Image: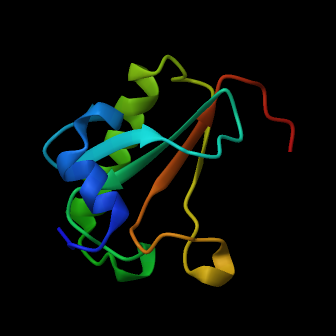
Amino acid sequence: MKDDCLFCKIAHGDKEHLVWENDVAAAFHDIHPKAPVHVLVVPKQHVDSLDQLDDPLALGQLMLAVKEVAKHLGVAGGYRTVINTGRNGGQVIDHLHVHILGGKQFTD
C-alpha cells in the first residue's frame, strides 16, 4: 500500500465504497460513470500502471477478479474493459485500474 494513493486508501480501508473484494483486488464505482455500470477494479498491491506490472500471476489474478466483478454486478457476457496507461493514455490516478463498463449495448 502506498500511503498517498487514493486507490490504495479505498482498497484497504474505505470498505463502504467497495462493491467487491478478495485478497488481491477490490472494486468500486467510478465517480464519473460512462455507462449504467461503471466500476474500477484495482490490485490491492500498489502498481502505478500496466507498464510496471511484471508479474504474470498478479496480472492473471487481476483479470480473474475483473471477470468475478462482472458476474457479481450482473453484466457477465456483455461488458467492456478498459485499461488506460500513462497520462498520454488517459490514466489520471497512478494506480493500475481496470474499468468495467456495462449495462448497455456498446456500438463503438
Residue at 65%, 40% in the rendered image? 33
Q: Can residue 100 be seen at all in this image of the molecule? A: yes
Q: In x, y percent, where is residue 3? A: 20, 72
Taking 48 as reference, is 84 left or right? right
- In front of the other: 33 or 70: 33
Query: How many marks are shown on the rendered structure?
Result: 0
Which of the image's four quarters has the N terminus? bottom left
In terms of image quadrants, where is residue 80?
Answer: top right
What is the x, y in percent for residue 103?
A: 66, 22
- Residue at 29% from the left image edge and 44% from the top image edge: 26
Is 69 rendered above or below residue 62?
A: above
Residue at the spot 30% in from the left edge and 50% down from the top edge: 10
Q: Which residue ends up furthest to the top in the rendered image?
A: 74
Q: Quadrant of residue 44?
A: bottom left
The residue shown at (35%, 59%) is 7
Q: Residue 32 at what x, y percent from top left?
A: 64, 46
Q: Does residue 18 appear in this view?
A: no
